[in-house]
Image (cartoon, helix red, strand yellow):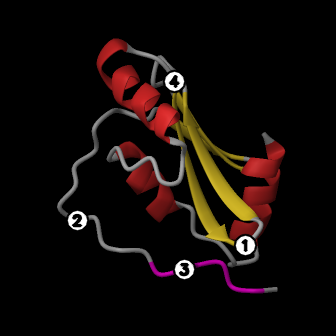
Amino acid sequence: MEDLRSPMPAFVTLQPRFPFGGLTFSSRVDALIRQDLLDPLPYVRRHICGDWGDVRAEHRRYNDAAMELGGYLLSSYTICDGLDLCIFTEADRGLTAVFLLDEY
């Protein structure tokens, strides 16, 4: 299987924009982690720093408003053709879930 750990740009200058609570992974994401094929943490870092990845413009606007007014936050990142990683933080910021788009 192809190594899905694509090099990510360094986001060392970005600060987290919100607390993300507990972190949970779907069983399929967990399997990719255990096979050492995916490191989701750079994508989680992007998510909590307000980089929403590949979501549509209207969802990007929703996320930006949810930062101010409250509401859930959803990011999506294309890892490779046919594999998209999604990250969802609950409105109360108590839990963040990482899953594959086709699990949604």
Residue tagged by mark 3? 6
Rendered image quadrant of residue 60: top left
Q: Give the magenta range.
A: 2-7
Question: Mark 2 vs mark 4: which is more N-terminal?
Answer: 2
Q: Which mark is residue 81?
A: 1
User: Which of the two discs, 2 and 1, labels the residue nearer the N terminus?
Assistant: 2
Is residue 67 found left or right of 44 in the rendered image?
Answer: left
> In which quadrant will I find the C terminus?
top right
State how far apart marks 4 and 3 are (Cα).
Answer: 27 Å
Q: Is 66 or 23 nearer to us in this picture?
A: 66
Q: Earlier in the sequence, mark 1 or mark 4?
A: 4
Q: Main secondary structure of the magenta part?
A: loop
Mark 1–mark 4 Cα distance, whole angstroms, equals 27 Å
Q: Report crowding for label 1: few under 14, some 14 to 19, many 20 or more residues within 10 A (C-alpha).
A: few
Query: Of the numbered discs in the image, which one, if any, rests on residue 12?
Result: 2
Q: Residues within 10 Å of mark 3 (few under 14, many from 20)?
A: few
Residue 76: give x, y in percent of width and height. 58, 50
